[in-house]
Amino acid sequence: MSRAFVKEDSGFVPPGHFGLPPRDDPGYDAAAARALIEAARDANTASAESATGYRWGEPRLQRHVRKLLAAAEALPEHEQDMRYIRVARRFLG
């Protein structure tokens, strides 16, 4: 589609495809936390917020983000995604 036909100022952010389970799934919050961190790494936070229903920094997701951060930091240094680690720390900050 031509960019001439895209209304960029509308404020609407289409939800992305984040592979989220149904909201009533017990693993939803963990998946939402992962989606938010991965989207932030890719500069797409608004789409993840729209898809998950959670805002950046949501206290309910902090324990999940701590687990994601710990796993990311536990990787060998040459395998670490430093952008992912930075955004996870920022989420918790």
Image (tube, rainbow, N blue to C red):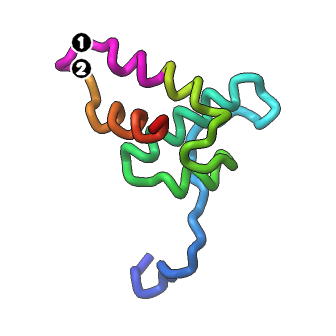
Q: Residues within 10 Å of mark 1 (few under 14, many from 20)?
A: few
Magenta stretch, residue numbers: 68-79
Q: Position of residue 70 (x, y in %)?
A: 42, 17
Q: Is residue 39 above or below residue 78?
A: below
The part of the image, by quadrant, that contains residue 47 is: bottom right
Amino acid, disc 2: Glu
Q: In the rendered view, would you say 40 is above or below 50?
A: above
User: Which residue is drawn at the image coordinates 56% and 41% (left, top)?
Assistant: 18
The C terminus sits in image quarter? top left
Give residue 46's position: percent from left, percent from top: 53, 57
Q: Nearer the viewer, residue 63 or 17?
A: 63
Most extreme residue toward the left is 78
Q: Is residue 61 above or below residue 14?
A: above
* Residue at 29% in and 38% down: 83
Q: Does residue 90 show up magenta in the picture?
A: no
Q: Is residue 37 left or right of residue 52?
A: left
Element under label 1? loop
Q: List the single residue furthest toward the right.
A: 24
**In x, y percent, where is residue 16?**
56, 51
Residue drawn at (35%, 35%) of the image? 84
Seen from the viewer's position, the closer of residues 64 and 50 is 64
Query: Residues under labels 1 and 2: Cα distance?
Result: 5 Å
CB atoms of marks 1 and 2 within 8 Å: yes
Q: Amino acid at mark 1?
A: Pro
Q: Is 52 displayed left or right of 68 in the figure?
A: right
**Residue under label 1:** 76
The numbered dot on residue 79 is 2
